[in-house]
Amino acid sequence: MNRRDFIRSSALTGGGFMLSFHITAHPALVAETETETAALGDFLQISPSGEVLFQFVKHEMGQGISTSMAQIISEELCADWEKVKVVFPLADMKKYQNDRNGGHDTGGSCTIIYQWDLLRKAGATARQMLVHAAAAQWKVAVGDCYAEKHYVIHRPSSRRLSFGELANVAARQPVPTDVTLKDQKTFDLIGKPKAARLIPAMVTGALQYGLDVQVPGMLYAVIARCPVFKGKLKRFDATQAMKVKGVKKVFTTKPIAGLQTETPFMPHDIREGVVVVADSFWAAKQGREALKIEWDEGVNAHASSEDFEKLAARRAQQRTAPTGYVGDENAVADISRVRKTLRASYVFPHQLHACMEPLNCTARVTPDGCEVWMGSQAPNLIVTEIQRVFHFREEQVKVHLFPSGGGFGRRYYPDMAIEAVFIARETGTMPVKMIWTREDDHQHNLAHLFQHMEYQAALDKDNNLYAWCEKEIRTYTWGAKYANPELPAMAYNIPNVRYDFEDMIPDELVHSSAWRGVVGHGRFFSECFVDEIAAELKVDPYTFRMALLKEEKDVYVGGEHPVSGSRLRKVLSLAAEKAGWGKTLEPGQGMGVAASPYGNSYCAVVAAVTVREGKLTIDKLTVAVDCGRVINPSGADNQIVGGLVWSLTALLYGGLPIKNGRALHTNFHQNKLMRMDECPPIEVHFIESRDERPWGIGEISSPLGVPAVLNAIFAATGKRIRKIPVTKEVLS
Amino acid sequence: MAQVQLNVNGKAYVVDADPQMPLLWALRDLIGLTGTKYGCGIAQCGACTVHLDGKATRSCSVPLSAVGSKAVTTIEGLSPDGRHPLQLAWQEEDVPQCGYCQSGQIMNAAAFLKQNPSPTDEEITRAMTGNLCRCGTYQRIHKAIRRSLTVKP
């Protein structure tokens, strides 16, 4: 492998220094075929005041990654945590070269995995330069000096110089080619709970999100988008809208409607519509209400989610060729071996992201170029798409990055930037802030994909689980022909496993997209079907799972990591132990379990519920997680808890009902989210891992609340629910 | 359009606005106080909570014409130095994730604790149930409110 490590140091005009960084990622993480370099770009500044500015190039959307990344770099730097600040640089395609190890991209619970080695090396490099600077100043041997809590100390004489005092000298030091990382046993910041770095700004209202940006002379815009997917604008009359005080301009988005990205796995849905630009958001919104619009509602004019579900159920019965299989692909139908076949269909409907910060983007277009202000999970895509669609050169596109009030996969797509830049260009040279109202968010947004899961299981004459057959119908594939992984992501010891896949993209009612828990929550219904098999065999569901999971057995299902039977057993047994699995329960109470890998992390959830007179109460969730090394236990706990609340919202209120092509839910009074009074206590336990490196944490729990609670409902009532949301009608 | 006088965080402002404009947008777009957030526009999420004469109010659903001379307090004016016991407790309990709804949560909790300085757990839950958090920080919000009662600013 051709290593191209490259670190550059530059003195800053105000004193101190900045390290820029290109480095080969951990070889274990980089396939030979992939690019070998990754970049943190300008990643770290140390000023004479001693302040350390960590240039955070990923996207902070509540997953706490800016804090855990800062912890890693500060650990290796031996910095005083209180003196480390997180700053958000401009998007820069050259500095923050984009690939899976570096750059701006933030998604798939990957950041910590791929940044770990880079950040450690970066911190250690800066530390070593400071130590060398001190040794040079004192004219002593480098080996007698060490860094501790923002100082370099000369061991024999106990002399000390602060990082700030050393910053200017360090700036003139050559960049070391070989750095020594800290012994992990000496870590005193990694593994310690730290409050998120941005909290002081959050709790005083000082933190600026994209929606908060104020650019002098700024106008505001809202768009009336076609309420029906694939519909078109027939005609509009802006006479009344133009009479609203403050309304400046009304025009259509026809020129950008239907545009797609060049990146096939990130398709989006820019709908035809009418833009209203005004001097305030309020006037723009009033103007929109005064528009008279006629839509050509097109193929989906009479579409409904009910019909869509029926269509999916019919497709599920069709014979297809397997995407992947183990053993005999037709084992489930082998009557010479099979005594009994079980079959069940599960439905995970479309779901909204409902980020608390509604989508928005501010843009200004001048003859010199284009400037954009927004929070984005993929600033690289913003830059390239704006360039491509509006014919700019890369250096003409300036993207100011902000944290967001929730991303959940939705802010990976560049559509809002294309809308905003188009609006700004058509408006003139003034900056324009385009805002999606909450109604827009609910009525024509991207949504989590729809999934229909069709399961079959075959038991042989000795009641062994002989074959498992799973067919998935879904509405989004990330541009891939098949879903990944190509087999159910289970480590259960089943001799014959088959997975079939069919997409329903051409039949879509809305545009599907990534969500929190990227791979599609429906696939985790396998944990319900396992329960069904256990129930058929009259075996305790926990005992049944443990019997199917072999120690030290890794199962390859496709994708990057095999599924480890040992690690699943560990999270299962810890969750069961902490939840008191098997204890005597009152009538109407029940416990359910679900466990799964996500990437190379593992999670098990035990749900305790009470169902009385058709009313479901979720009493408690007990969770065990193995995510390798935990960087920030407080932040990690937040992610697991947050993912489960996310899951419970889908369970109780999820779905995107559509009739006559239109979303029936318009705002939070109809599309409900879980609130404090329904939120159960959630207790999280982390496995003491032998792993030296961290694995992802942001999404692993989010698909598991649904199967755990559905299994608990079955334990409490004997009722098997195979579709969400779990409404009162379903339970009574 | 009309000249509307507002008293926000102890300061007098005159804004030129449609009297039907909700207070939220006057605060954010005309006065530049963006700590108060837009979440739903229909008083369902609580992200826009401010105090009107000390009472927790959803600013997205109060037209300027209804504000009159009432004292408006936003998150920026909750304490002079950001050290209100709730703000400190929020930090100590590491409450926010994305943080977007949290100024509304804090403003709602602050008004509630003024009325009920020693609430039961159930009373805290009931008081906070009108505020949505998509990141699911409810457990920590509850803990932080409890903790704030013992925090010294």
Image: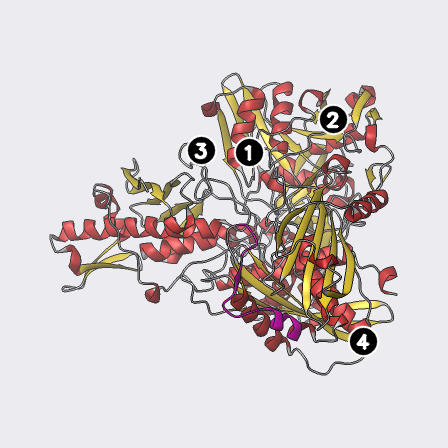
Q: Measure how far apart labels 1 and 3 are at the Cα level.
A: 14 Å
Question: Which quadrant is home to the N terminus of chain B?
Answer: top right
Name which residue type carries label 3. Answer: Asp
Q: Is residue A730 left or right of residue A74?
A: right
Are the numbered discs 2 and 3 placed on the same chain, yes or no?
yes
As helix, strand or loop, the secondary structure at mark 2 comes to loop
Q: Is residue A660 left or right of residue A139?
A: right
Residue at which label 4 appears: A588
As helix, strand or loop, the secondary structure at mark 4 comes to loop
Q: Identify the colour scheme used.
A: secondary structure
How many residues crowd around disc 3 within 10 Å: few (fewer than 14), some, or many (20 or more)? Answer: many
Most distant residue in the left direction: A139
Q: How many marks?
A: 4
Are the numbered discs 2 and 4 placed on the same chain, yes or no?
yes
Most distant residue in the front direction: A336
Residue at which label 3 appears: A92
Q: Position of residue A398 (x, y in %)?
A: 49, 29
Q: Measure how far apart labels 4 and 1 are at the Cα level.
A: 53 Å
Q: Which callout, 2 or 4, points at the residue further toward the start of the chain?
A: 2
Is residue A533 shown in magenta? no
As helix, strand or loop, the secondary structure at mark 3 comes to loop
Is residue A548 shown in magenta? yes
How many residues crowd around disc 4 within 10 Å: few (fewer than 14), some, or many (20 or more)? Answer: some
Residue at which label 2 appears: A272
Write the start and end of the magenta stretch as one range: A543-559
Residue contact at pointers 2 and 4, CB within 8 angstroms: no
Of marks 2 and 1, the one in the foreground? 2
Res A301 → quadrant: top right
Name which residue type carries label 4. Answer: Gly
Residue contact at pointers 2 and 3, CB within 8 angstroms: no
